[in-house]
Image (cartoon, helix red, strand yellow):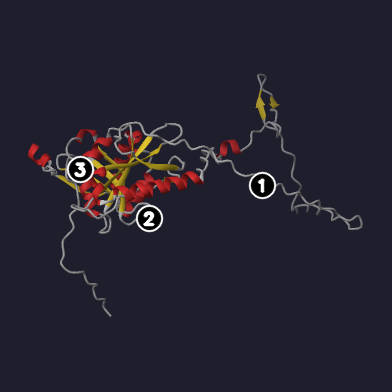
Amino acid sequence: MNELISQNALPVPNAPITVRPATHDDLPWIDALHKKHSKQLGYATTKQFQEYLDLGGLLVAEQETMAQPIGYVMYRDRYLKRDELGVIYQLCVDPSAQRGLIGATLLKEVFERSAYGCRLFCCWCAQDLPANRFWEAMGFVPIAFRGGSTKKKRVHLFWQKKIVEGDTETRWWYPSKTEGGQMREDRLALPIPPGLHWSEPMPVIEVKEVPTPLKPAVPKKRVTTSKKQPVAEPPKPRMPMQFGPPPTAATPPTAPTDSGATASLPCPTPQQVPPLERFSGTEKKASRPKAPPIDPNLVRQARELRDRYLEHVNRPEHASLLESRAKYAVAKQLPAFDELPTMPRLAA
């Protein structure tokens, strides 16, 4: 085992692991496992799992000795409108099957199934989670960070990995700003300062509300009517047509008394009847207020800092600044070819 780890190779699991696309029958199990670890994975609905299943971005891992799946991964091989960048949204392994290379096998299968032009994969992970050790062991590199929600005051790390074995030409990249998301807050992403470990405190920028300029009040035009102009009378209500004898007055409901006679029950007034809207179930829940926008000057400065930082670390002489500390080699191997591929001929 030590020889395999020193050679940076992925050991063979003790029990054979099979990775396949998820089916509709797997959704209840995936949803139940997600709910148990929602604080570490983040919020997701069954509808979102259904969407990724239909798009082929949901894989499950199985073992012959287990009666049900033991792990799943939710991903896409195109992120933020960039064809060379994929993203891992969720990766979860059942606690009873952990420490068995299940997550590494799922990652390798994701890389193999990704598009040909996809050369990078990334993920966001809260700084206080032990999952960061896993991403570091899989060869991901911490490049940038962003502030979490205003309530929790967490820091999210941006991990990235070159998924093609021996790739030295693909350039590192990260977004300088993320919009909305589950927290409905725009956040700035900053590069991790050189020499600072990803587990150390990060200098998060506190974004304050930008005052919006007040619009000048427009005076309302006063509409006057001429005295000579006749005022239109409101239309008279039409009387409903009636056929047959006139309806009799409804008698109030009666209730028996102790003496056997009946007494009329009091009829509630319209003011005492509760409104139907309280019981109709159509009330809308109070939505969470949207966070204020970020100052455009800060956005511009964060983008310039990102471009300057990436220009520096993407130089060949500075390759050691973002050096991978992978424990296992989990990469994609592209088939080699000597000539350019030709387009197939279409039948006339």
Q: Secondary structure at mark 3?
A: helix
Of marks 3 and 2, the one in the foreground: 2
Please give left or right for residue 97 compared with residue 210 in the image: left
Point out which mark residue 81 bears. 2
Q: Which quadrant is the N terminus positioned in?
A: top left
Q: Secondary structure at mark 1?
A: loop
**If you read the primary sequence from the N terminus, does the residue marked by circle 1 or circle 3 appear first?**
3
Q: Quadrant of residue 264?
A: top right
Q: Residue 23: x, y in percent? A: 28, 49
* Distance of label 1 from label 3 (alpha carbons): 56 Å
Amino acid type, residue under disc 1 in the picture: Lys
Q: Nearer the viewer, residue 70 or 343?
A: 343
Residue type highlighted by circle 3: Ala
Disc number lying in front (1 or 3): 1
Q: Is residue 269 left or right of residue 149?
A: right
**Cα distance in 3D space between marks 3 and 2:** 26 Å
Q: Residues within 10 Å of mark 3 (few under 14, many from 20)?
A: some
Of mark 3 and mark 2, the one earlier in the sequence is 2
Instruction: Compare residues 348 and 134 and report the one nearer the observer.
Output: 134
Q: CA distance from mark 1 to mark 2?
A: 36 Å
CB under 8 Å between discs 1 and 2: no
Q: Quadrant of the C terminus?
A: bottom left
Circle 2 Cα neighbour tier, 10 Å, few/some/many (<14 / 14–19 / ≥20) = few
Residue drawn at x 35%, y 55% as measured from the top left? 82
Q: The residue tagged with tag 2: helix, strand or loop?
A: loop
Percent coordinates x, y for residue 74 in the rendering = 30, 46
| Residue at which label 3 appears | 104
Q: Nearer the viewer, mark 1 or mark 2?
A: 1
Q: Amino acid at mark 2?
A: Lys
Between 346 and 78, the one nearer to me in the picture? 78
Q: Which residue is mark 1?
A: 215
